Amino acid sequence: MLTLEKTGARQTYSGLVRPWECDENEHLNLTFYIRAFQYASEALAADVLRANPGAASASLRHMRFHRELRVSQTFAIDSAVIRGGEHNGRILHLLRSNGHICASALDLPGFSTEKVPVLGVAEVLPSFTRGLSSAPSSMSSSQCDPRTMMPLNLGVVRPHELDHVGQLQMHEIFSYCTLASLHILGDIVGLSPEWKKVSGCTHMGVEVKITRHRECKAGDVLSSRSWLASVGEKSLVLRHCVYDHLGSPVASVEQVLVIVDFKERRVVPVPLFVRAYLST
């Protein structure tokens, strides 16, 4: 497993898992992993630029989640720029706790990386990204399956969701899309709270990619076109296109989820009724 200990990578954030940041399974909610990566990104950019660009520090963030974090666990993030290979020029962030890599992120940076510590391509895990391409996502929903496409009004952007320069924070974008995901999984394909209770299973995010297209301001009304894009034997992919009230594109979000038997703590096949949904 890749570590950044011997590469000169910079520690860019350290944190603690707090009870109110955890989900119903008592694990750190993905929203707060994403927030931690944003803090790391801004710290690295501020160190280089001598000023903090806020959310503009990255236009794309592609994350994988390897290990769960629980209440009171401490963690730290190390960051470096990749030179060479398919991820050349991307910033790699590794979030670790007790010596274990719990999550990783690839950023498309919005600032010069000349002064950022370098990570050679030979040191990068070749299988870093699995379910999703690391290329920026488009705002096209033309390929969506109308049976699972759900248009949703997500709410109104409030000042506390913006950063210090007035840009909508990336973890807030993801939080809006979480609402859409739960509607699709529970209301359309049947992975409802009742199903969770009866089956003893739950769905868990293992990969997320967020592409920013334009900035929002407080008072913008957000909506999404969200749909179940694909279903495999052990994973499923959700896609979201987020717009403001004028129809301007704000962000694209893609999620890979797996089904986990909560008692056995292992990934199990996606239920047949979900796999059959897109084949009917």
Image (cartoon, rainbow, N blue to C red):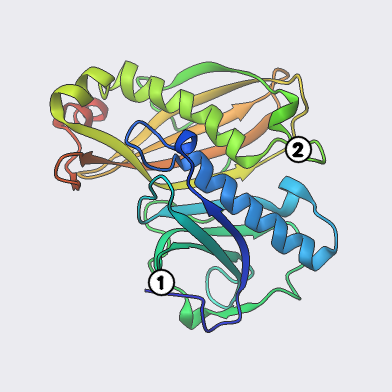
Secondary structure under tag 2 reads: loop
Q: Nearer the viewer, residue 123 or 143?
A: 123
Q: Residue at x 73, y 21 (%)?
A: 220
Mark 1 = which residue? 126
Q: What is the number of callouts on the image?
A: 2
Q: Residue at x 60, y 75 (%)?
A: 9
Q: Residue at x 39, y 24 (%)?
A: 182
Q: Nearer the viewer, residue 208 or 132?
A: 208
Give x and y (percent) for residue 93.
55, 63
As displayed, is residue 36 above or below residue 12? above
Residue sticking out furthest to the front: 72
If you read the primary sequence from the N terminus, does the residue marked by circle 2 or circle 1 appear first?
1
**Residue 54 seen in the current view:** yes
Q: Residue at x 75, y 75 (%)?
A: 114
Crowding near the residue tagged with mark 1, few <14, some 14–19, many ≥20 C-alpha atoms within 10 Å: few
Amino acid type, label 2? Gln
In the figure, is residue 242 to the left or right of 204?
A: right
Residue 67 got which mark? none
**Residue 139 seen in the current view:** no
Crowding near the residue tagged with mark 2, few <14, some 14–19, many ≥20 C-alpha atoms within 10 Å: some
Give x and y (percent) for residue 89.
64, 69
Mark 2 = which residue? 167
Foreground: disc 2 or disc 1? 2
Spatial CA span between label 2 and label 1: 33 Å
Secondary structure under tag 1 reads: loop
As displayed, is residue 267 above or below residue 101? above
Give x and y (percent) for residue 162.
73, 34
As displayed, is residue 108 above or below residue 34? below
Amino acid type, label 1? Pro
In the figure, is residue 121 to the left or right of 41?
A: left
